[in-house]
Amino acid sequence: MLEMGVFGGSYFGLNIKEFPSIWFKNVKISKNFDVSLNRFKIKAGLSRQHWVEKGWIFKEDPLGWFQWYCRYTLGRRINHIDIIQIKRWKNFRRHVTAIEKNCEKGNLDCRKRQRQAILQWAYNPYR
């Protein structure tokens, strides 16, 4: 995901020491959001303020779902948070379905915003 280009390169800012350096070997990171670093060169997703208003930010992962995902991948488990975040991930599949239903297979210009969004949610955007 990181190598493909997500979150304008700025999800973690420059604070990546918590995670394996191999994850960032071929990744361009930025202190500030840079749309040119996204795979589809388009901004996708909602604002952090929206996430907070919806109750999607938890003290355990103040940066949101992707921070949780990275920590989960590394083996951290917090049962009540894991249940919520896995449910959110499963619900995001509707965007994958929309791409499959409305786009010719392999047409990466079709629904680029949704493709960028599903990439940021760990789904394959090349469907």
Image: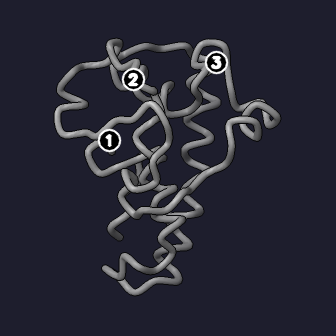
- Image vertical order of residue 127 relative to residue 2, above or below: below
In this view, the residue in front, 110 or 29, is 29
Question: For the residue labelled by badge 2, is the local secondary structure a helix, a strand or a loop?
Answer: loop
Crowdedness near tag 2: few (<14), some (14–19) or many (≥20) residues, C-alpha within 10 Å: few
**Colour scheme shown:** one colour
Report the side of 2 relative to 79 (left or right). left
Q: Amino acid at mark 3?
A: His
The residue carrying mark 3 is 80
In contact (CB < 8 Å): disc 3 and disc 2 = no
Report the side of 27 relative to 94 (left or right). left
In this view, the residue in front, 61 or 86, is 61
- Position of residue 56 measured from the top left corner of the image (x, y, whole percent): 70, 32
Crowdedness near tag 3: few (<14), some (14–19) or many (≥20) residues, C-alpha within 10 Å: few
The residue carrying mark 2 is 14
- Position of residue 119 measured from the top left corner of the image (x, y, whole percent): 42, 53
Report the side of 51 relative to 115 (left or right). right
The residue carrying mark 1 is 2
